[in-house]
Amino acid sequence: MAALTQPTPLDHHFTAVVLPEFAGVAWTCVLMPNSADIFATRRAVKVTGTVDGCPLQSSLMPTGDGRHMLPVKALILKTIGKGVGDKVAVHLTARLS
């Protein structure tokens, strides 16, 4: 059984446009620029943070081009009053293992 580790604190901010899908995947998401360099991986990365101040726990999914896409649930978009085509402020606060 793998040992549990503590979350790694982050303080990374970016602004992105909400997309209806990316590369044929029909998830409402935002793209994080330079994420493969920031996280030193091109694999999925579990994170916590906020989208326009609304709490989020999700996984950044690799896109294959050095970025990751962050799925944003419809409930979060409804809560913050945003939708496809709108800009949102993302603040990542921890990397989970």
Image: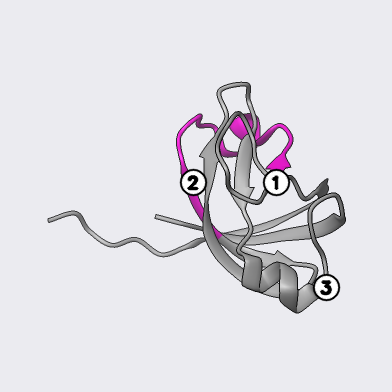
Q: Residue 38 appears in which quarter of the rendering? A: top right
Q: How is the image coloured?
A: one colour
Amino acid beneath label 3? Gly
Kindly identify which residue carries mark 1: 20
Q: Can you say which quadrant of the picture contains the N terminus?
A: bottom left
CA neighbours of label 3 inside 10 A, class few (<14), some (14 to 19), many (20+): few
Q: Is residue 4 above or below residue 85?
A: below
**Element type where label 2 sits in the image:** strand
* Residue 20 versus residue 37 in the image, above or below: below
Figure quadrant of the C terminus: bottom left
In space, the residues marked 2 and 1 are separated at their CA atoms by: 21 Å
In the rendered image, the residue lying farthest to the left is: 1
Residue receiving disc 3: 81
Q: Magenta segment: does it hold 43?
A: yes
Instruction: Point out the stretch of residues depicted in magenta.
Output: 31-47
Amino acid type, label 2: Val
| CB under 8 Å between discs 3 and 2 | no
Residue 38 is inside the magenta segment: yes
Query: Pointer 2: what residue?
Result: 45
Is 8 displayed left or right of 82 in the figure? left
Is residue 5 depicted above or below 80 in this figure? above
Camera-side mark, 2 or 1:
1
Task: Name the residue located 19 percent from the left edge and 54 percent from the top edge.
Answer: 2
Query: Are dots 1 and 3 in contact, CB under 8 Å?
Result: no
Q: Amino acid at mark 1?
A: Pro
Q: Position of residue 81 (x, y in %)?
A: 83, 73
The quarter of the picture where residue 35 lies is top right
The residue drawn where x is 70% and y is 41% is 32
Q: CA distance from mark 1 to mark 3?
A: 16 Å
- Number of the front mark, 3 or 2: 3
Q: Give the x, y percent position of residue 72.
A: 63, 58
